[in-house]
Image (cartoon, coloured by chain):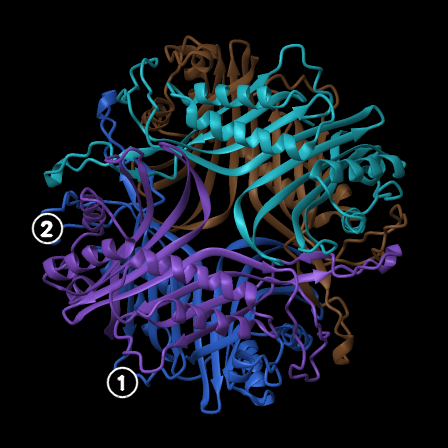
Chain colours: A brown, B blue, C purple, D cyan
Amino acid sequence: MELGDNQYGKAEVRLVRVDRDGPQHRLTDLTVTTTLAGDLAATHLTGDNAGVLPTDTQKNVVYAFARDGVGQIEDFALRLARHFVDTTPTIDRARVHIDEHSWDRVGGHSFAKGAGTRSTTVSASADGEWVVSGVGDLVLLNTTGSEFHGFHRDEYTTLQETSDRILATAVSARWRHAEPTDWGTSATAARAALIGAFAATHSLSLQQTLYAMGQKVLEASSSIAEVRLSLPNRHHFLVDLQPFGLDNPGEVFFAADRPYGLIEGAVRRPGAPEPGLAWW
Amino acid sequence: MELGDNQYGKAEVRLVRVDRDGPQHRLTDLTVTTTLAGDLAATHLTGDNAGVLPTDTQKNVVYAFARDGVGQIEDFALRLARHFVDTTPTIDRARVHIDEHSWDRVGGHSFAKGAGTRSTTVSASADGEWVVSGVGDLVLLNTTGSEFHGFHRDEYTTLQETSDRILATAVSARWRHAEPTDWGTSATAARAALIGAFAATHSLSLQQTLYAMGQKVLEASSSIAEVRLSLPNRHHFLVDLQPFGLDNPGEVFFAADRPYGLIEGAVRRPGAPEPGLAWW
Amino acid sequence: MELGDNQYGKAEVRLVRVDRDGPQHRLTDLTVTTTLAGDLAATHLTGDNAGVLPTDTQKNVVYAFARDGVGQIEDFALRLARHFVDTTPTIDRARVHIDEHSWDRVGGHSFAKGAGTRSTTVSASADGEWVVSGVGDLVLLNTTGSEFHGFHRDEYTTLQETSDRILATAVSARWRHAEPTDWGTSATAARAALIGAFAATHSLSLQQTLYAMGQKVLEASSSIAEVRLSLPNRHHFLVDLQPFGLDNPGEVFFAADRPYGLIEGAVRRPGAPEPGLAWW
Amino acid sequence: MELGDNQYGKAEVRLVRVDRDGPQHRLTDLTVTTTLAGDLAATHLTGDNAGVLPTDTQKNVVYAFARDGVGQIEDFALRLARHFVDTTPTIDRARVHIDEHSWDRVGGHSFAKGAGTRSTTVSASADGEWVVSGVGDLVLLNTTGSEFHGFHRDEYTTLQETSDRILATAVSARWRHAEPTDWGTSATAARAALIGAFAATHSLSLQQTLYAMGQKVLEASSSIAEVRLSLPNRHHFLVDLQPFGLDNPGEVFFAADRPYGLIEGAVRRPGAPEPGLAWW
């Protein structure tokens, strides 16, 4: 037998940082996952750990580096990923994923947790760095402006066509950068583009909305080369109220849990550079 | 053997209602649970279901009643609870619990899901109705202004005293009303009071903060007779960076999952009426 | 304003104990929650913590007491609850809840996690101790032998009567003891009684099954005074295959998530002593 | 902008099938996800759905095909995947993922849910089919026989070396087949190999255990070409009882939630065929 691809790291390091240097405290709330790969055959084959930087150490590095400040999560992930590649002899590639949880200020040193996360995945090797940014926990709903008809029908098709339905999804979006940018400004613009495109697109399919969302993200930030979107279709079914002598003109819905449609796709800028390790 | 207390109902009916009558659509997103009690011995003892209103029917009632509009969740729960008691011969008591999920408008017919839920629990019997309102999914954090010292020490106590710590909690609050009020205005005021008291209280213990939060809710709305709070203490531990030659002046924290402190308490208005079935 | 009922403690202390004294290791995997109540007004009203035993100390006690061995979870909870009441001046009442996670032996020192938990909730005060035992994470399903008809119908009732359905539930059961017993033997017998009664009862309603389950638990162990059951009705809907030219003679089902029926009830031994603090 | 890789399908179709043809009923409990890819540009770019088989139809196919019986999940997934590719003009590739939830018989028509899932992911195109099998929800723990020392140390390393620790993980394993086999027998053998290798390996690192587990799966079933394992390291920390005057000879542990190590790797049979679409 032979060893194939392998990697290891520390998952879900919970880091909260308080910046106390201004008139008001600032709060940064991160979940950090580090992943390392390289020449790790010995520990797999014989249990010789001489080339293994402990995952406990990886966690320590996250906390120690936060002492100097975190800044934009892409920059923090770049520092961490570069460190692991540069200082660990056996490690050729490092990937650092960060979810940043949002908090709204409700006082000089007080915060309320908001919805939505911003994320980044940075990969580094001897050949360079690759930065992916993203958002999660972004649930959007249009009460109208969504149709679905003209689809392929076969003997198993019972779905009615509709010219007016609720369209709802939990956006999971990631985009890779072709070059460094102002990460914070770019993330804000991308998030606004996602929401704006979802709201503004008169949708004939969730796929069409997906493409529009990706397109708008690319238009919003010239550094972005490609957007990948995963959009669950959170079905809302019109309730049949006829047994109770009532009509239901698009007002009363049952929000279903499972099953759900799942639409996934990428939108790219023509001529964009190769992804390299971006999606590793 | 003998039958003791019993009840039954339909849990977690997912209802989304769209109001289309104004220039902009309005969205109401609820999870409704109904619970009925009364003379239900026959179904338990012999399987005679003549006195059992099916839970499926309870679900139907939720959807059918939504056809006329939902309005404030307390009012919707009152309609539902009163209906079950008044129309089902065997049923003496009904309880309707509703969680209302928050959405922020991002377009004329577009919404993004926000953080936080508003809730109500209404109980009804031949003797009257009891209304409890509440909030959930409200996570608050103070970066400073929290101390904990002077506590009881015994041979198992190793905790260091602190005069500056992070204080964080996920507020679960419920309050009962002594009389009807403008439910929406009251809920907004109570939520603001909870956040305001958490932020403004220089805390010597989470218990002290709990009491201040309850007190402010009672002060904010004269209809409220009692507030019950459950506050998990989401511990944030200062990371020891000394092994890396670094100090840590209250800046880098590990956010722990388990175990957590759990502080629970009630604050009452003196002379408030008895709770009746409010907390059933 | 005035302080009402209040309590505090440490929730979800994760304790794993290895007994190494026999030829094979034994494994005990617990989640322990402690709750204390008493004269705690000072910390609420002024932040004076002199009467507050830190929740961190409560956690320490759980680990320290485990050094002597855990034994049956009821005994361990009794030791803990009694300790807090007897040694903390302000504390009048203590409650200790333990979930024991099941593991199956797959080697001399190797285990695989199984389904199901055993639980206990012990309360102690100056007046005595009260022991509740229970099970959780016990999901049962009958493919036949379940009917539901003859129920109350009103204008909102659309449910079809059925003489053969799937009956499925996730059992949550707790029972209080009137006197000490061999906790392990009793728990094993009660669990077997729950499963046996669910399987053996030809059910005309889930309420009938609930009563039978409670009855069999009481018959199985003379120390048990009362059983409380909470049984979600995990609906399995027969799929309509007629659009595809197929019948469906009770074979193909959709397992729904929400909403679900929720049936709750108690079965008592006549003449059983009062519950005291058992259900606190 | 241009459309990149895309796919869509129905996620988490909950199918329960009862086989009633024998003296005892048999129960099959599946969660099925279908994913289709092909020429789907039109729906993304213009909302023209003529090439889109609705996800609702995909769900219908799952239920309709179950009418004939499910059999081994690999066979059922093969039927489904092949159907979508063969009958939908725009679809070039289909992937069907199935999780099979385990139930233990407790009566002639009664079952209790067990731990562990068996899974499959089948991909089909005009070029053939690829079958991946796997297990999930398999949590294993060794109380001894695990060491970790001799690892790479740098300035951020504080971890103590250990020659005796608890090793615990939640196994997620998937393996691809080079040729058809008796799927049920193979799955049983692979599961036994995973558990056996975990228990029998004196571990110097979780990586070493991972490799041994993969190796044993390959040895157990000659049809298997490659095994991929993802093993979270569920850390159990020895509790320091010295403050209470107690030693702790490997007996009392704190089971931590986060962060956790995450070890991932593949083991291959030399000369195995290329994976094709197996890991799509």
- Asked if residue B81 lies left or right of residue C85, the reply is right
Query: Of the numbered discs in the image, which one, if any, rests on residue D65?
Result: none
Hey, which quadrant is residue B253 in on the image?
Answer: top left
> x, y percentage for residue D152?
34, 13
Q: According to the image, label 2 marks what residue?
A: B153
Q: According to the image, label 1 marks what residue?
A: B271
Hey, what amino acid is under mark 2?
A: Arg
Asked whether the viewer can see residue B259, the reply is yes
Chain label for disc 1: B
**Which of the marked residues, 1 or 2, is nearer the chain's N terminus?**
2
- Asked if residue A174 lies left or right of residue B196, the reply is right
> Where does the C terminus of chain C fall, quadrant-wise?
bottom left
Distance of label 1 from label 2 (alpha carbons): 37 Å
Hey, which quadrant is residue A4 in on the image?
Answer: top right
Residue sitting nearer the eye, A54 or A237: A54
> x, y percentage for residue B274?
33, 85
